[in-house]
Image (cartoon, rainbow, N blue to C red):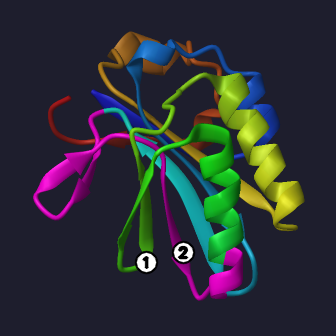
Amino acid sequence: MRIRYWRLGVNDLLNSTYPIERANHWEIKCLQGEYEHFGVFWFRYGTPFDKELINGICFYYNDIPQDKVRKLLEFLQGKYGGKTLFRQSRVFLQGSKEFSDKNEIANLANEISVKFNGPIEITLEFEKVTEEEQEKNTFNFPSGKALPIVGSD
């Protein structure tokens, strides 16, 4: 089964013990106001861009000034590289460095929070999680933050 852990903080992530090869997706959401926010994310199997999948780090933004979008793009591209592709309010860094390690995600979340002066929330999704792993909480996330996803892996 797939399972998503949401509204995690950096310490939740650092205290976890998940197998990185089963991380399917992660997102770091940074709040900038009541409705203003952006999110940096990654999907293991690529992110849809029209009808093709793009591999690499991506981000979206909602009601964020263009100068902040540009600063976020420069920040991420400077760290992870990639060719910039724009699609409405989403930006793809095609071919950028990809990762699912908790320390690297936590470090990026901290950097984003400090650089863009906003609180962050982290979401992680895993695939091929067994019932036993979920019941025993072997990934060591707060159990109240787990959302099982129906359907096949």
Disc 1 packing (10 Å; few <14; some 14–19; many ≥20): few
Residue placed most toward the observer, 120 or 65: 65
Q: Does residue 132 appear to the left or right of 37 in the view shown? A: left
- Kindly tell me whether residue 7 is visible in this rendering: no
* 21 over 126 or under it: above or below: above
Q: Position of residue 82 (x, y in %)?
A: 47, 45
Q: Position of residue 48 (x, y in %)?
A: 23, 55
> Which quadrant would the C terminus be assigned to in this image?
top left
Q: Which residues are magenta?
A: 45-68
**Amino acid on which disc 2 is placed:** Tyr
Q: Which badge, 1 or 2, is on the more N-terminal residue?
A: 2
**Amino acid on which disc 1 is placed:** Ser
Q: Secondary structure at mark 2?
A: strand
Q: Does residue 80 appear to the left or right of 50 in the view shown? A: right
Q: Residue at x 66, y 88 (%)?
A: 65
Q: Which residue is mark 1?
A: 89
> Which quadrant would the N terminus be assigned to in this image?
top left
Q: Residue at x 10, y 58 (%)?
A: 51
Residue placed most toward the observer, 43 or 19: 43
Instruction: Tell me which corner region of the image, top left, top right, bottom left or bottom right, holds residue 22.
Output: top left
Q: Which residue is mark 2?
A: 61
State yes or no: residue 49 in magenta: yes
Instruction: Tell me which corner region of the image, top left, top right, bottom left or bottom right, holds residue 9.
Output: top right
Q: Position of residue 115 (x, y in %)?
A: 85, 60
Pointers 1 and 2 in contact (CB under 8 A)?
A: yes
Q: Residue at x 71, y 68 (%)?
A: 71
* 55 over 66 or under it: above or below: above
- Kindly tell me whether residue 87 is visible in this rendering: yes
Q: Residue at x 76, y 25 (%)?
A: 14
Q: Alpha carbon of mark 1 to alpha carbon of mark 2: how far? A: 6 Å
Instruction: Tell me which corner region of the image, top left, top right, bottom left or bottom right, holds residue 125.
Output: top left
Residue placed most toward the observer, 103 or 66: 66
